[in-house]
Image (cartoon, rainbow, N blue to C red):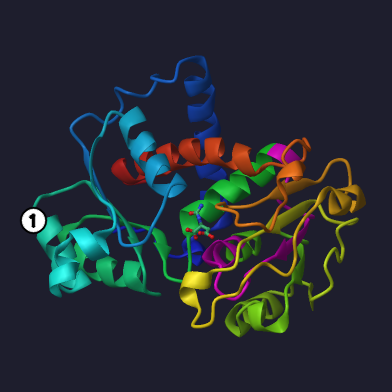
Amino acid sequence: MRHIIDARDFHRHQLEDLFEFTTEIRGRCEQNKNACRAWHPHELVFLVFYEPSTRTRFSFQTAALRLGMDVEITEAARQFSSAKKGETLEDTIQAMCQLEPSIIVLRHDSDGGARRAADVAGYHGIPIVNAGDGGNQHPTQALLDLYTIQSEIHRLDDLHIVMGGDLAKGRTIHSLTYLLSRFSNVRFTFIAPSEFQLPESICTHLREHSFPFTQTDDMGADFERADVVYWTRLQDERRDVPQQSPSHIITPKHCQQMREDAIIMHPLPRVGEISHDVDVDPRAAYFRQIKNGLYVRMALLSQLLRNE
Ligand code: NCD
């Protein structure tokens, strides 16, 4: 049973296959956005979201509709599903599986929530797609991030990526770091105060796979060398003491340090850590990421339905 739970489950050849298929879908949809509507009729996807979402929920929903699938959604599942009455995640997933969806896309508020759901749904032969589990991982965001890097930089080997913001709790950072570690000669610079730095387990992963990385609190470090500057917001909802405002904000002044062929990425939403006057810079790729996400998720859902 293939679930999409953890970025580490993807091997390089699977990423390459997925991105080739994504590019095919993108080509078709750019000609005619309904080009794939006849691909998966009568398939049903459940979107079960225990945490707020704009992009990921709309992206999965649009991807499914563009493939001709039917979609059922519960958003704010903490308030509007039986979780409110005290039902466990396992029982909720068990109940949903009785209705025979083809796929369940789950955003859960606890680390490991997607894995727990997969243990139940796998028994019914229903794949779980992790749309974010607490501060742990967000593999489909990382897939669309990686696809964006490939589309814009034209390679995934020999990269220097600077990551900043909430590296400790930012699940997109964790998943993207794991995906990039499938490629060669990738160098990382992680910019954050020590309490926001990358979890030790991911540092260990990078060391074990011989990837050079630097951890610093120096805003702008290595910007002049970077192919990609990937920024994130502070994950205040995952912290006991909320931060008032981000300590490191990207402004046009920082963009001046960057190479002409570099890109600036962000999974969004941003809450002040990239100033709005950066948006007009052609290197700002964060809205283009969203478009790519639609095609990556179409490819992923279609692959799952074809059992590839
Ligand atoms: C991210 C998430 O939910 O982890 N958003 C997204 O899915 N695009 C990033 C975030 O919320 O900070």
Residue 49 location (% of width, % of height): 31, 57
Q: Quadrant of residue 254?
A: bottom right
Quarter that holds the N terminus: bottom left
Q: Secondary structure at mark 1?
A: loop
Cβ of mark 1 under 8 Å from ligand 1: the answer is no
Q: How many marks?
A: 1
Residue assigned mark 1: 98
Q: Quadrant of residue 190?
A: bottom right
The structure residue drawn at horizontal position 54% and vertical position 51%, both measured from the top left corner, is: 143
The structure residue drawn at horizontal position 42% and vertical position 41%, both measured from the top left corner, is: 59
In this rendering, the answer to whether 29 lies above or below 256 is: above
In this rendering, the answer to whether 240 lies above or below 79 is: below
In this rendering, the answer to whether 74 lies above or below 190 is: above
The front one of 41 and 166 is: 166
Q: Quadrant of residue 12?
A: bottom right
Mark 1 neighbour density, 10 Å: few (under 14) some (14–19) many (20 or more): few
The structure residue drawn at horizontal position 52% and vertical position 71%, both measured from the top left corner, is: 236
From where the camera sits, is residue 136 visible? Answer: no
In this rendering, the answer to whether 202 lies above or below 225 is: below
Residue 45 location (% of width, % of height): 25, 44
- Residue type at mark 1 is Gln
Side of 203 relative to 91 (left or right) = right
Side of 39 relative to 221 (left or right) = left
Residue 154 forms part of the magenta stretch: yes
The front one of 160 and 168 is: 168
From where the camera sits, is residue 221 visible? Answer: yes
Q: Which residues are magenta?
A: 152-176
The structure residue drawn at horizontal position 41% and vertical position 44%, both measured from the top left corner, is: 300
Residue 126 forms part of the magenta stretch: no
